[in-house]
Image (cartoon, coloured by chain):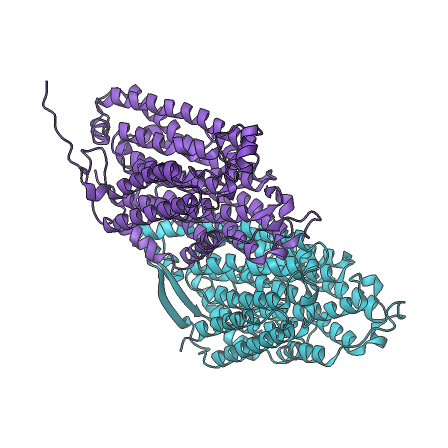
Chain colours: A purple, B cyan
Amino acid sequence: MSEFISPTLSYSLLSPMLVVFAGAIIGVLIEAFASKAIRPIAQVSVSIGTLVLALVQVWRIRTSGSTSAAMGTVIIDGPGILLQGAILIISIIAVFLIADTENFAAAAAAIPGSQEERESIARGQQVTEVFPLTLFAVAGMLLFPVASDLITLFVALEVLSLPLYLMAGLSRRRRLLSQESALKYFLLGAFSSAFFLFGAAYLYGYSGSVSFAGIREAVVGGTGNDVFLLIGIAFLSIGLLFKVGAVPFHAWTPDVYQGAPTPVTAFMAAATKIAAFGAMLRIYYSVIANAEWSWRPLLTGIAIITMVFGSLVAIAQRDVKRMLAYSSIAHAGFLLTGVIALNKAGLDASIYYLFAYGVATVGAFAVVTLVRDSAGEVTDLNRWAGLGKRSPWVATSFATFLLAFAGIPLTSGFIGKFSIFSAAYESGSKAVVIAGVLSSAIAAFFYIRVIVLMFFSDPLEDATSVLIPSILTRIAVLFSVIVTIFLGVFPSPLLDFISNIAIFIR
Amino acid sequence: MNYLTLIMAIPLLGAALIATLPQSKSLLAKQFALGTTLIAAVATIFMTTKFERSNTSLQFVESYDWIKAFGIKYAVGVDGIALVLIVMTALLTPIVVLAGWNESEGGRWSTKTFYILILVLQTMSFGVFAATDVFLFYVFFEAMLVPVYFLIGGYGSGERSAAAVKFLLYSLFGGLLMLASIIGLYVLSGEQGGHTFNIAALSQLEMSSTTQNLLFLGFFIAFAIKAPLFPFHTWLPDAAKSATPGTSVLLLGVLDKVGTFGMIRYCLALFPEATKTFTPLIITLSVISIVYGAFLAIGAKDIKRLIAYTSISHFGFITLGIFAMTTQAQSGATLYMFNHGFSTAALFLVAGWMISRRGSSTIADFGGLQRVTPVMAWSFFIAGMSSLALPGLSSFVSEFLVLVGTFTRYPVAAVIATFGIVLAALYILIPVQRALHGPTEPGNENLKDLNLREKIAIAPVIAVIVLLGFYPAPALNIINPAAAQVVTQMGFSDPAPTHGGK
């Protein structure tokens, strides 16, 4: 029997993830033992405190690099740290929205419409399991882009996905829709996990190793069986493309975005994308870069279809959350152009784009949580008519995010689009750039239509009212607006920061 | 002295000041806006006196790093062509503010917002003419759509939101094509010695003729939509009809000039070979615009649409002058841009007053205004004469220069374009006759003539039209060296006259 080797862990480099895991466990304990009165405030403070502490840790290790932080299962390097930072910042503002527990089911385990549910509402009960769930998901997301073997990658994928499946079903209103979306997300997610594992198995068969270093060596050496490599890459890619919502693996996106409680949608739309693209960038840029002949043409096709499809279908949407869902599909296509670029400029641009897009997305969904009538949030676009008249600030904020999505200059979205398209052009993928520019034109149409509706239409009779935002929601919206405009006018500091430290180590 | 940044900052500061005013003080907002635009106009004129006319290089140059990672600079500077357009913008804006004193009152939002939008637009208009960094130009080019969009959609009349959206989508589409071309230039510059957006550096790039043609088209289509040139013109009549008269002046007088200015500054300078390839096509489109725009104008029943159609015809002349590649035509085209700004301003402003008094924009509803409102009628008449390029008024000089300059190289195009002048007489004289002369139509008897504010607003416009008609030298002296420079840089020299002095 071989001797047991105790693992050596670099606690310092792993601290962001460890802090978040610990915070999540404290959250579970609070949920179990704290009294009803102090639970919400305790949960919010623990979540925000944990995330801020983790962000501080990320800042501390920002220039570090190591492949041996956790026995070769995790690589801490520039891109990973940047993405972790982005995930944490986005999660903090998302928690600000989640803190409004009004959006969540009083007792999520109760069957919708049952006696049990009515009783729990009557008692004023409010479970707050959403906070530890969020922290677990964040922990998984932090691990996802820094994982450096397929097993860790898979564990991270599941750690981030399982809480999200639950969170999607927590909506207080329209519970059946919410639960349906959770089930859909779970089934399709489980399916894609299976694809992912299948691909991982083939890559192991190809290279005889589950570690990224081992697979890269095999790809560079080119001695393995290419059929195994192709099947492995294809299935692994399906798993990842599912998470980012690329066509044709996008079918869950609109339903889940619509059904999930809006703060959860905000978190999921922004943070999951960063984590999943982070992992994709690492795999495509550093692990299988030498096999680009096998995946690049296909990924180019998927990118083009994704952006065109997302933009076209978004035009037909009448529900603001579904519209944002299709818009996120289109943006997944734009982000894929960064993956295809396969150069340093593409990496920098993708990280910048992910952060800029994430912030604007959380901001946009934050605004959606504010527009309500007596029955809860109003997501029917027609009833947003005249919002600019009644609540100019809310409407102006939303318009800012839409202009950023559309890539109008002086917003973060424009710099993101410019950098990512120029990187793709530089690498010779001109078709993608042209498709990207044309779908941006299509996308501009539906973003502008919403602005028209808010500012140029008269309010309907059954007017929706805008909730007076809680202080946390207000901070979230304000922060997003400021970041969106600042990154559009003075992008240099962040661009330089990214460009200096975003280098994959192997 | 950083004149250009200064004149760009003045309106922005004014806008910030107005933003702090309480909602109810709408009169104060108007006064602030007028004051700001007057200060900007004075500053611009002062800058013009410092301009060295014989110097053909860019002047008042400033350059700072903006986004270092992409080699983007905040770089501004003007030559004679850009300067003239900046002066035009600076002069027209206070006139628009004064003339449209009550325009903001039918809007969806407050008066305050209206003037903030106007002032922000002015800053961006200065920026778009002054930029010498392609990226900076693009940022202004796209960002200025936003205030115009809200001005049309928020304060216009009729189908205003539909017109605003049509305007925005057309422009965005063109802008995105241009963005693709800009990315192309950026990548090429990176391959040939470092990323830059400096126009001078970009014009030195070597590229294959296919690349050059494609990149040229990206820019040209964007500018042709903006200008607008047939067949990209369909957004203009709707936008001009729905916008307030003041917004229309800024839209046709200033914004659309960005299109023709862009052709000179970017299409010609960056892609000389492609320009030569496409010149026959563009000359053809220009001639079609001239004639087609004129026919549409003759058939128009609505005054605002009529003015928009006449502009399509005029933009045909400007484009013709730009691509004829002779110094006279080039100078004529730039002078035309300047003059067109003022004659369109006069037409739109007076038409706006007529419409708001009568409550209708249909030409047939007017009649006999000469007797009821002599000052208004005469103002409209002079504006109309300027639009048909009556000798002695400013437009004549520029139209003549364009035609003479074009004839030496493209005689057929020049001859057909000359018919445009005949048609212009028709499309102006018919409405003049119907609206101003003849018996007073019922409903027009009690119309009030121009008040003092309106007279003060229209007087400088008419003064410019008449003065530059008799003595165009002040403008031409600034334009000529720059225009000659453009033609020489393209490798053209003026064709020698075919008949020597016998």
The answer to which of A48 and A206 lies nearer the viewer is A48
Q: Is residue A199 above or below residue B452?
A: above
Would residue B127 be visible to someone looking at this image? yes
Q: Which quarter of the rendering shows the N terminus of chain A?
A: top left
Relative placement, left or right, of B95 versus B157 is: left
Q: Is residue A469 above or below residue A503?
A: below
Relative placement, left or right, of B311 versus A312 is: right
- How many marks the image carries: the answer is 0
Relative placement, left or right, of B157 versus A334 is: right
The answer to which of B160 and A382 lies nearer the viewer is A382
Relative placement, left or right, of B428 versus A304 is: right
Q: Position of residue A33 (x, y in %)?
A: 37, 38
Q: Position of residue A265 (x, y in %)?
A: 47, 39
The answer to which of A229 and A476 lies nearer the viewer is A476
Q: Position of residue B253 (x, y in %)?
A: 61, 66
Q: Position of residue A200 (x, y in %)?
A: 30, 24
Would residue B401 be visible to someone looking at this image? no
Residue drawn at 45 percent across, 35 percent down: A167
Residue A428, by quadrant, is: top left
Q: Is residue B3 above or below residue A317?
A: below
